[in-house]
Image (tube, grey):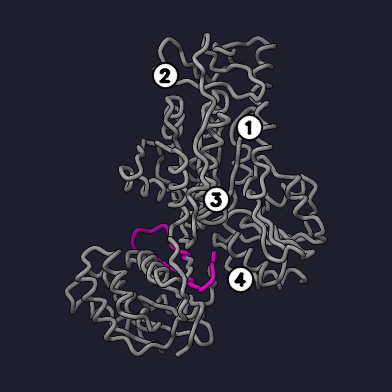
Amino acid sequence: MIKKTEFSILFGGKAGDGIRQLGTLWAKLLSRQGYRVFLYDDYPSLIRGGHNFTIVRASSTPVLAHNEVVDLVAAFNQESIERHAKSLKPDGKLLYDADLAETSGIGVPWSSIVGQAKAGKIMRNTAVLASAAKLLAMDWSHLEHTVRSELPKSEKNLEVARLAWEATPEPVFELAETNQEPWPVMYGNEAIALGAVGAGLKSYIAYPMTPASSILHYLAAYSDDLGITVIHPENEIAAVLMAIGSSYAGIPAMVGTSGGGLALMVEAISLSAQSETPLLLVECQRPGPSTGVPTYTMQGDLNFVLNAGHGEFLRVVLAPGDASEAFHLSGLALYLAWKYQIPSFLLSDKHLSESLFCQSIDPGRLPKIEYKAWDAEGRYKRYMVTEDGVSPLAFPGTAGIAVKATSYEHDEFGITTEEPGMIEAMQAKRLAKRPSLNKELDKPELVTVGGNEDSETALITWGSNKGAVLEAAEELSLRYVQPLCLEPFLESRLKSLLSGVSRVITVECNATAPFTNMLKAHGINIDHTIVRYDGRPFSVDGLLAQLKQEVPL
């Protein structure tokens, strides 16, 4: 047997075969044994048909990205063999359904096994799970526990698993013991949802749009447990306006969408800014423009999010790179929206939102919503001019006062005005929030650093590129820098972290490198830029090859 401390498997089949569920089960199976896992999911925008595959990488050390070259390919059909057999390592193995394909490798008759057990066709993925576990010399007890914990109809699933286990040849791999406690596994969108709830979210309002849709599904499924109201209105415009209304009433709300949905919400973003109503928007990017490629990934909406809305107003844009950062930054984004009464953005993408991470997360670090409350003294001025620009909040139903919210320019009471002095005073008041906002965000924890911090070459990236770029920096002994806050731009902190660097390489998953251009605009010299814009994310091995080919290191 080949002993491994790291192992990558690719499950391939067609939509409807349960490939993603299988990958999740496999990840949980290995996580329970102390392994750190990462799952990348690749699927077309089809309900049935089309080729799907999932790569799960497991290691005794933390991993945040996948490799394209794997140890084991588990193929549900001939197409998967033809597509992925070339992805095997020299000592890798091909596992396939002997009923549906003929090739060299390890054939197990999964289709016949499901028929023998008189089980549903979807349970073929349970048979594949059992065969893969057997080939890795796992104890049956680990597999049984995962099946019982994660699958309905567990007895029938266990019957299928046992038949597949017995039909699979003796193990060819062995995973070393980790002696580590399991870490939780969660998808990026689950982390976003839980972080916001932990910070005080009470309402989630969204129209489904891949890859943000799973936030809606997750929060709807657990709304009672989490104490949150979840609403699916008729369209994106209704969603964002309902969220603004919710916040106006004192109920913290969040909206999730992708680029096309955000395009419909732009006018409402300006309404949030003018009315100073807190608003948190999660924007999960996908390739575009227009409908683009709905189920794949790209970082093409940065400039859009930085500039969405008409007029001059403050906003916050936070961009996490993994599930832990997504959890904490969604809470921070909600906190900032309420503290400063501004629109706040959490910028994700398909790769972050729909990948599965295994990380230790500390809920104690989450900020809790706070806001400047009206002290009930004198007449209530919704837009009172204050030194820091933040006016006291009160909500409808408060006795004896009128709580205004308006899209028009207004005076301190919220009464419409066109007087030049008042227009200037209100604009200055809203912009007066910037100094304290900048100070609050100028924190070490809002820039992730790693790799060799003494290196004179730095790799800088943002968002979901984190896993691949960080590992490449460690492999090549380069400095790694990743800002988590893109607006306000952390210029002084970034320049300080790049002190002593003679060469800067940026990595972006888009075609026009807007993040690189932002760095240049702030006086940071960029020597080379690596981009990918085919709808797929960077893998560790792919990025290393690209760096070695394009950049003299």
User: What is the CA distance from the residue labelled 4 to the residue labelled 3?
Assistant: 23 Å
Up/down of 88 relative to 17, above or below: below
In x, y percent, where is residue 108?
31, 84
In x, y percent, where is residue 128?
33, 76
Residue carrying label 3: 288
Up/down of 35 relative to 258, above or below: below
Nearest-to-viewer mark from 4 and 3: 4
Residue under the image location 53 percent in, 47 percent down: 365
User: What is the CA distance from the residue labelled 1 to the residue labelled 2?
Assistant: 25 Å
Determine the secondary structure under disc 1: loop
Q: Which mark is residue 542?
A: 4
Q: Amino acid at mark 3?
A: Gly
In the picture, measured across the screen, residue 369 lies left or right of residue 491, that is left
Nearest-to-viewer mark from 2 and 4: 2
Q: Which mark is residue 396?
A: 2
In the picture, measured across the screen, residue 14 lies left or right of residue 297, that is left
In x, y percent, where is residue 374?
51, 19
N-term mark: 3 or 1: 3
Crowd around label 1: few <14 · some 14–19 · many ≥20 (10 Å): some
Nearest-to-viewer mark from 3 and 1: 1
N-term mark: 4 or 3: 3
Crowd around label 4: few <14 · some 14–19 · many ≥20 (10 Å): some
Which image quarter holds the C terminus?
bottom right
